[in-house]
Image (cartoon, rainbow, N blue to C red):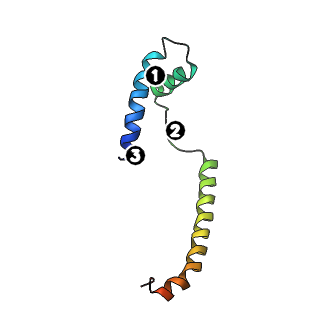
Amino acid sequence: MNPDQVIGLVLVPACGTIIPLAPASDISVAKALVRRVGAGTAVPAEPPPAEIEELRQRVGELEGRLDFGERLLAPARQRHGAGE
């Protein structure tokens, strides 16, 4: 099953239950969800610059690790003919 389908199967019924019940109850989380969805701010348009910089740094570290792993595996691949 596609992850988008799973999200739809879980999120749609949950929102369909929580949102109508929120104004009639004292569920603060549900009320906050109703306000955010109603205001159209459920997903921020752009992540904060600090978060973007942190993600860039982490991607750079991962690239370095991947390069290191490839260099370690290259001799074994050449011996076994997998590099062709």
Q: Residue 18 carries which label?
A: 1
Depicted 47 relative to depicted 10: above or below: below
Image x and y of residue 2, in percent: 36, 47
**Which secondary structure, mark 1?**
helix
Amino acid type of disc 1?
Ile
List the single residue furthest toward the bottom.
79
**Which secondary structure, mark 3?**
helix
Which of the 4 quarters of the picture holds residue 14?
top left
Image x and y of residue 71, in percent: 58, 79
Nearer to the camera, 77 or 62: 77
Mark 2 vs mark 3, CA separation in Å:
21 Å
Q: Which of marks 3 and 1 is nearer the N terminus?
A: 3
- In this figure, what is the number of numbered marks? 3
Horizontal side, residue 22 vs residue 57: left or right: left
Q: Which of marks 2 and 3 is nearer the N terminus?
A: 3
Characterize the local packing of mark 1: few (<14), some (14-19) or many (20 or more) Cα atoms within 10 angstroms.
Answer: some
List the single residue furthest toward the front.
80
Residue bearing mark 2: 44
Amino acid type of disc 3?
Pro
Residue bearing mark 3: 3
Query: Which residue is drawn at the image coordinates 49% and 33% (left, top)?
Result: 42
Query: Which residue is drawn at the image coordinates 49% and 32% (left, top)?
Result: 41
Mark 1 vs mark 2, CA separation in Å:
21 Å
Query: Which residue is drawn at the image coordinates 61% and 69% (left, top)?
Result: 65
In front: mark 1 or mark 2? 1
